[in-house]
Amino acid sequence: MDRALTPRAEVRENLMVITRLPNKSCLRRFAISCLSIVLISLVFSATVWGQSAESTPQLKLMPLPRSVKIESGALVLDFHFHAGIEGSHDVRLDAAMGRFLERLDRECGGIRRAQADPAGAAANVLHLKVDGPGGAVQGVDEDESYRLTITPTSALLTAATDVGAMHGMETFLQLIATENDGCQLPAVTVDDAPRFRWRGFMLDVSRHFESVDVIKRTIDGMAMAKLNVFHWHLSDDQGFRAESRKFPRFTEAASNGMFYTQEQMREVVAYARGRGIRVVPEFDMPGHTSSWLLAYPEIGAGEDIRALPTVFGIPQAELDPSNEKTFKFLETFIGEMSEIFPDTFFHIGGDETAGKGWLENPRIVEFMKKQDLKTPADLQAYFNRRLLAILARHGKKMMGWDEILSPALPKDILIQSWRGGASLSQGAEQGFEGILSAPYYLDAQKTAAEMFLADPLPVETKLTADQQRLILGGEVCMWGEQIYPETVDSRVWPRTIATAERFWSPQADRDVPDMYRRLRFTSLELENIGLTHISGPEKLRRNLSGSAHPEALDVMASVIEPASFSDRYQGQHTDALSSLDRLVDAVVPDPVSRQQIAREIEEALTPGQTGDAMVTEMQLRKRFMAWQEAAPQVEAMAQYSPRLSDLQTRAMQLGELGTMGLEALAYLEEHTSAPAGWKDAQMATISVAEKPSALVRFVFLPALRKLVDAAATTADRP
């Protein structure tokens, strides 16, 4: 019996025909372009329909506040908008209001800096009231809470401190929606405060130096994420990055000319304070000190350091705890740095000190015997006790990695756990405060979801209530072996925002799909405030392809992600001199295609297809055909470009996987099971594609396996 085709069905059948056209056919390309226009209109109409069906607006807030109550109505923003601050506050809050109005104007137009009324006049639409500026030196117990009430006629933001007020302004900006050719905010009451007091981000600038501009835009992103600690890893084996006027050889001999002057470090501290962020410096000791000993060998254990290491790893280099000159040196150095960094905490590193140099030095071995120190760990504990006294004299608290945990130290030190939750809990059980970093290493290339779900205090914790209070929060870590200024943003953002939500929001916040929905909006706003996590990789791909419009390379880049640090280190043998300018550097971790393809395949396999599901199938076909089109073009690039030469295998696989996807959809559409042997052949192809190659990996293979498996038994589907 004849049947009339709906517009969606007609497009779908035409796409089936296009699928069978030759891969490089001009007719195929033209047909794809024409039908794409129809497809876009259908997707748009489906999207609009879906939005109109929503009874409650979907907010874009990230991190998710503690409490949100949506009321009826909306506050419309126009040229009548004025804002004012009431209450005692620092000039930093006035500056924050200026930045707030600039962003508001960029989003909505017609709202200028001049529309901030410091007198808090009755004409103000936004009334900002603070109880006081907060601590002269922001501390771990700073009150960061705020309350934001928006009605159809006005908005009231109240906070105990400047920092809370700045958090509230970020929430206000995230509530803005473009409706009816203008900007408006839903009537809403937000009652918010962070779950954890310590919400940090660590940047390693020792392996690869990052400019002050990079540091500042990173801090801007942290402010949006409501993070409150910038942990600045300033020294390691590969470089010493802080100017010391007491010990100038640090920058003369151990920095390769790349370091921060004291004026620049003070500038960063002030910039961060202006955004409610503390700066904690880290100077790694007694291990990871090749740069120290290159400059000042007299405080070392005897290692002959003649140049900065370029190979990553842990060179044998330790300060000498048996030498009183070492502690006199540290007294002077810590005193100098304490004048630059006002924060209470001073990070001493303390990790991965094997003590091999100590055990090879007869004088140090004799010292250990006299002090009844049986192991290098005992000697490190001795060193830390001496160091703790120095820090205390300069008004500082000791902070360090897991290895500093020792019953010999008082309980007011802070442990940063890179080994895992068990280590963190062990410290809390012994009475030590701690923060968690183990699940939040960005160079491990974990997904945003993995880090979002990893909790410093999981529901199943066995810690008592008192022990739980010792867990101050967590810190995201970006180690510097495989980043440089043009790629650092794409490794940090937007995944760090997902982790920041874990540190800020209630423990019950576990909705991964909604997190990704909100992350897409937040990612764009990060780019708007100056981050380059989207534009940076695009720029590098243009450079790699030698084209202003590298469509084929973009298609491939959209469905792959970088290998982890360890995989890349082993596969490429990177060191401090390696060029970080290949495709692995021009793709992003956890790209949006991972969730998109998984969702599209899930919808395509849902029984009882609706019109939206058919649109989804068409989108999948378009995606698979794009892979087929891109594959030979990327293969051709790989043949003439040395920096793309390792991509031939991956490009070939992309084409094969596109063909596989189209065949699977065809079997599903025709309700015909794939022939015998087809599934095994496709699964074997996927298994090969899962293996390491070109330092990148496909992100959609689990979803494609699911599609192939369904296509092999299509006849059984309803």
Image (cartoon, helix red, strand yellow):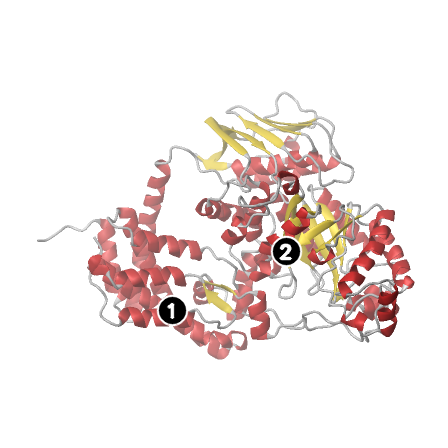
In front of the other: 224 or 465: 465
In front of the other: 96 or 444: 444
Q: Tag 2's secondary structure?
A: strand
Question: Is disc 2 in contact with disc 1, using a CB cutoff of under 8 Å?
Answer: no
Inspect the image, locate mark 1, and give the three-letter code of the amino acid beneath it: Ile
Q: Which quadrant of the figure has residue 619? A: bottom left
Q: x, y (%) of residue 241?
A: 77, 61
How many circles with numbers are drawn on the protein?
2
Residue at x 35% of width, y 63% of height: 705
Q: Is residue 622 above or below residue 97?
A: below
Inspect the image, locate mark 2, and give the three-letter code of the amino acid beneath it: Cys
- Is residue 698 visible in the rendered image? The answer is yes
Q: x, y (%) of residue 192?
A: 58, 33
Q: Residues within 10 Å of mark 2 (few under 14, many from 20)?
A: many
Q: x, y (%) of residue 387?
A: 83, 55
Mark 2 and mark 1: Cα distance apart in space: 32 Å
Residue at x 30% of width, y 56% of height: 618
Reading the image, the residue beneath label 2 is: 477
Q: Is residue 189 above or below residue 305?
A: above
Residue 597 as seen in the image, left or right of residue 292: left
Q: Residues within 10 Å of mark 1 (few under 14, many from 20)?
A: many
Residue at x 77% of width, y 40% of height: 137
Residue 22 as seen in the image, left or right of residue 369: left
**Considering only order in the chain, which callout, 1 or 2, is on the residue closer to the N terminus?**
2
- Is residue 33 visible in the rendered image? The answer is no
Residue 28 as seen in the image, left or right of residue 482: left
Q: Is residue 431 above or below residue 134?
A: below
Q: Is residue 175 above or below residue 488?
A: above
Q: x, y (%) of residue 650?
A: 44, 72
Reading the image, the residue beneath label 1 is: 686
